[in-house]
Image (cartoon, rainbow, N blue to C red):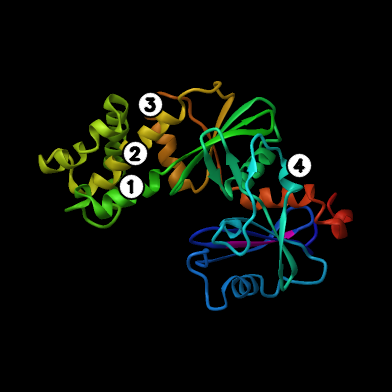
Amino acid sequence: MSDKTALLALDWGTSALRAWRVAADGTVLERRREPWGILSLPEGGYPAAFDAITEGWRADGIPALACGMVGSRKGWQEVEYLSLPLDLHRLAGSLAAVPCSAGVLHLVPGLLDEARPDVMRGEETEAVGVLDALGHPAGEILLVMPGTHSKWVRVSDRVIASFATFMTGELFALLCRHSILGQGVPVGDGGAEARPARDEAFRDGVRAAASDGLAGRLFSTRALMLTGRLPAALVPDYLPGLLIGEELLRADEGGPAPDRVVLVGDAALTGRYALAFETLGRPAPMEVEAASVRGLYRIALAAALLPTFAGDAAC
């Protein structure tokens, strides 16, 4: 193992910018995070944000690679979507480049599922990282990536075959802030001591979605609160249960049965989804922390961006 920097890896999203200093063997040497998503850049824009988050890391010959919304229409430079099906090598062979203080910042393309249609940026890199963590298995794998816009990604024999987006997180925020369902609901999470009650309220929401679907049960959130059957403090648990329950029910419609299901992302979110799977009587999925940096490293290797350090890669 070496402490020599081989790659500057960035996941540049809508609301945040994450960066890692990576060794030739893939070890993360240092990580940083700033609230500089593409909609909240510091003065000086993209170049200033890149310089600040990689300060002290840059040196001659060290490649830089970024995924996410930085390659979108509102990003530093737009990168065309790649159509499905898609594997690691076609993704690595389609990188774009933008001049920067490191010489060139390589950008990972997003993906287009023309059949739906649907698009994504950033999750394709996480998918690469998860498949690498699993040892690149053959067969049918379903990756569930919770978030503001949750992604369900189907991988068939190491190839991304299809995906679907569910606006679950954004719908929850809109309903809480701009609908009658959020009126009278206190701000806060109820505290750790209330976890059993919160989990049961969430389960009740999942069961309600399974019973009548989202449209038929959404207003039950308000009715249950007004009649005292649902404490106002538990609305932020019951309502996500409805939304996530609906997502699970609709996302599994059609397609081959997966050999395994993997939850990808922040533990707080994946934990809720795991509880929804359990409530619906489905096998517990594996859980993998966000895999962006692992995916960026694998893409960089496949794109031959690390030739200077090839001798260290076997350490």
- The span shown in magenta is 18-22
Specify whether 307 is left or right of 138.
right
Q: Provide residue 280's location: percent of width, then percent of height.
A: 38, 26
Task: Name the one closer to the observer, 67 or 258.
Answer: 67
Q: Amino acid at mark 3?
A: Leu
Which residue is labeled 2 in the image? 243
Magenta span dominant secondary structure: strand
In the rendered image, the quadrant that contains the N terminus is bottom right
Q: Which mark is residue 280?
A: 3
Question: SS class of the residue under badge 3?
Answer: loop
Task: Specify which label sits upstream in the sequence, 2 or 1.
Answer: 1
Task: Specify which label sits upstream in the sequence, 1 or 4.
Answer: 4
Which residue is labeled 4 in the image? 89
Q: State yes or no: discs 4 and 3 in contact (Cβ < 8 Å).
A: no
Q: Provide residue 48's location: percent of width, then percent of height.
A: 61, 75
Give me the residue at 78% from left, 47% from top.
Answer: 302
